[in-house]
Amino acid sequence: MTERESAKTRLEDAVARLETAIGAVTDHSKTAELEKERGQLNEELTSLRTEHKGVTEQLQSLQEDYKALEKVVDQVTDRLDTTIDRLRSVLEA
């Protein structure tokens, strides 16, 4: 092998090692970016879970209020019906 071929081979080997090193650095950089994004997504998930819990509690409270109001409406309706019936009786007499 001539000196020129030997130098070419060493250069090609060096370039291959450099490309491998750059690939490793790039992969590490991507991994760091992905980890950062993962952390942000976990924070967002925690926040959304907290918000979901609060909204669920509000919904349950509103459903209970609605049921209570339904009972009141039923009572008022019965009383109005009774009053209307009495007024009819008085007017017919």
Image (tube, grey):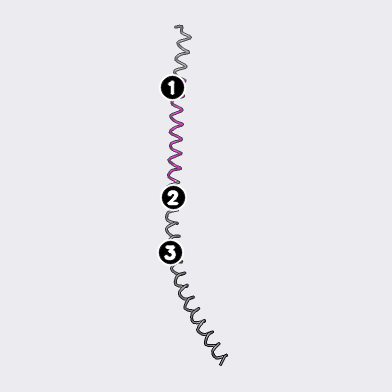
Instruction: Between label 3 and label 2, give the one nearer the viewer.
Output: 3
Q: Residues within 10 Å of mark 2 (few under 14, many from 20)?
A: few
Q: Is residue 17 magenta?
A: yes
Q: Which residue is mark 3?
A: 60
Task: Point out the tag, 3 or 1, that comes first from the N-terminus.
Answer: 1
Q: Which residue is mark 1?
A: 17
Magenta region, mostly helix, strand or loop? Answer: helix
Residue sitting nearer the eye, 22 or 46: 46
The image shows residue 34 at horizontal and vertical percentages of 45, 39
Task: Point out the tag, 3 or 2, that comes first from the N-terminus.
Answer: 2
The image shows residue 28 at horizontal and vertical percentages of 43, 33
Residue drawn at (46%, 8%), measured in percent from left and top?
A: 3
Instruction: Between label 3 and label 1, give the one nearer the viewer.
Output: 3
| Direction top: furthest residue | 2
Q: Secondary structure at mark 2?
A: helix
Task: Point out the tag, 1 or 2, that comes first from the N-terminus.
Answer: 1
The range drawn in magenta is 15-39
Q: Quarter holding the C terminus?
A: bottom right
Give the residue type at disc 3. Answer: Gln
Give the residue type at disc 1. Answer: Arg
Count numbered badges in the picture: 3
In three-dimensional space, the C-alpha distance between marks 1 and 2, rounded to whole angstroms, equals 41 Å
Q: Quarter holding the N terminus?
A: top left
Q: Is residue 39 above or below residue 13?
A: below
Q: Is residue 12 above or below residue 1?
A: below
The image shows residue 17 at horizontal and vertical percentages of 43, 22
Q: Which residue is mark 2?
A: 45
